[in-house]
Image (cartoon, rainbow, N blue to C red):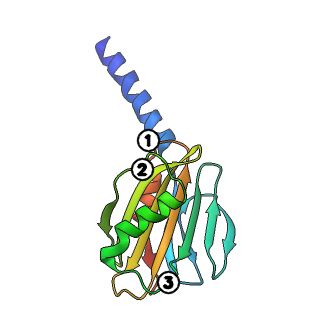
Amino acid sequence: MKRRIFTAMAVLAFSAFGMNAQTLQSTTWKAYGISFKAPAGFNVEDDSEEGYIISTPTYYITVQLLEGEGIKRSELSQELKNIASDDEVTNQTPVTTFELPQFYGAQLKGNCETEQCIYSYLLTKDGSSGFYVSITYTDKQDNTPENILKSFSLEE
């Protein structure tokens, strides 16, 4: 009997995990050759030099080129915090930094009105360009936005 209960609980746990798992597919912002994994079945809302915006019923992803005099790696965290505050992101987490093969990054999470959001700045390791990434989503426990953010790369 205990074995059946354990098996049933394991099946339920796996099913719950499966509902939160999201199939990702590659996409590319052609204007700047930046690629990342996005939720399958997305709609492209903008693919221009101004930005790359895609969406599904659960996710809204915006990628834009950082404008200005050239942001430095040491400035990523403070600049990100400033833009999140300007956008009135509430319940902000502390800014965390990370490194991808081609980028230095900074990110924070918070609430964008009624949705969850991740704000991030990505700076190419050679310092030639930077990108702003915003991902809004519904479920606070969803790990897919982190997986999306960590998949960014430049096409060669």
**Where, quadrant-wise, is the N terminus in this rendering?**
top left
In the foreground, 10 or 123 = 123
User: Toward which corner of the image does residue 70 lie, by quadrant?
Assistant: bottom left
Q: Earlier in the sequence, mark 1 or mark 3?
A: 3
Q: Between residues 21 and 99, which one lies in front from this camera angle? A: 99
Q: Nearer the viewer, mark 1 or mark 3?
A: 3
Q: Nearer the viewer, residue 48 or 132?
A: 132
From this viewpoint, which residue is outermost toward the top?
Answer: 1
| Residue plotted at (63% across, 82% down) | 49
Q: In 3D space, how far apart are the residues under numbered discs 1 and 3 (Cα atoms)? A: 34 Å
- Mark 1: give few (<14), some (14-19) or many (20+) Cα within 10 Å: few
**Any mark on residue 68, and which?**
3
What's the residue at 35%, 80% (across, down)? 72
SS for dot 1 = loop
Relative image position of residue 66 (x, y in whole percent) = 50, 78
Q: How many marks?
A: 3
Please state which amino acid type lies under the numbered disc 1: Gln
Disc 1 designates what residue?
141
**Contact flag, marks 2 and 3 (Cβ < 8 Å):** no
* Amino acid of disc 2: Gln
Give the residue drawn at x 35%, y 17%.
Answer: 5
Quadrant placement of the C terminus: bottom left
Res. 151 visible in picture: no
- Where residue 13 sits: x, y (%)? 40, 31
Query: Residue visible at 43% across and 70% down?
Result: 121
Where does the image place residue 155, in percent across and percent down from the top left?
A: 47, 83
Circle 3 — which element? loop
Judged from the image, the secondary structure of the residue bearing numbered disc 2 is loop
Residue at image mark 2: 92
Task: Nearest to the eye among marks 1 and 2: give it.
Answer: 2
Amino acid type at mark 3: Gly
- Mark 2 and mark 3: Cα distance apart in space: 25 Å
